[in-house]
Amino acid sequence: MTETIRGDVLHAIPPDELDEEDLSPELRALADSRHVLVVRKGGHPSILDLIWAFVRRDPIEAVTVVTDRPAEEDEEVTLTVEETDMPGVYVTAAAHGEGVSANSR
């Protein structure tokens, strides 16, 4: 089952830098020669959103996405993803071989 995630890229790891990062063996195997993005779900929150999240003790969620598409930090992306067996880790349908594209604003 797929879902669409829209958010800001907090950290981007290109395929040639995967070995330099402290990734779990499972994530490293899933990434293989793809990009790994850490994305803040929902885009860039306003100051009011940050305060409201703090008051509610409801943190702003960051997820990890493995994708064929490169992205830069602070770029807003919209990705069609599938959940993996690892909590908080998704793979784009295109990276998973199903031909759904990842879009940028």
Image: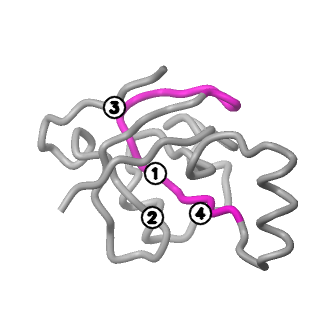
Name the residue: 50% across, 32% down. Answer: 77
Please name the residue that numbered disc 2 is placed on.
89
Tell me the amino acid under the disc marked 2.
Val
Q: How far apart are marks 2 and 3 (CA)?
A: 16 Å
Relative placement, left or right, of 58 versus 3 is right
Outermost top residue: 105
Q: Given this view, does label 4 or label 2 mark the residue nearer the observer? A: 2
Quadrant including the N terminus: bottom left
Circle on res. 23: 4
Q: Distance between the residues labelled 4 and 3?
A: 23 Å
Q: Given this view, does label 4 or label 3 mark the residue nearer the observer? A: 3
Tell me the amino acid under the disc marked 4.
Leu
Question: Picture quarter containing residue 46?
Answer: top right
Residue 82's place in the image compared with 55, above or below, is above
Tell me the amino acid under the disc marked 1.
Val
Q: Label 2's element?
A: strand
Camera-side residue of 6 and 48 = 48
Query: Which mark is first along the chain, 1 or 2?
Result: 1
**Stretch of the chain drawn in magenta:** 60-75
Residue 94's place in the image compared with 81, above or below, is above
Circle on res. 38: none
Circle on res. 65: 1
In the rendering, at what x and y percent does residue 105 appear?
48, 20
Camera-side residue of 13 and 65 = 65
- Whether residue 29 appears in magenta in the rendering, the answer is no
Query: Which mark is first along the chain, 3 or 2?
Result: 2
Question: Picture quarter containing residue 29?
Answer: bottom left
Q: Distance between the residues labelled 2 and 1?
A: 6 Å
Tell me the amino acid under the disc marked 3.
Ala
Please name the residue that numbered disc 3 is placed on.
102
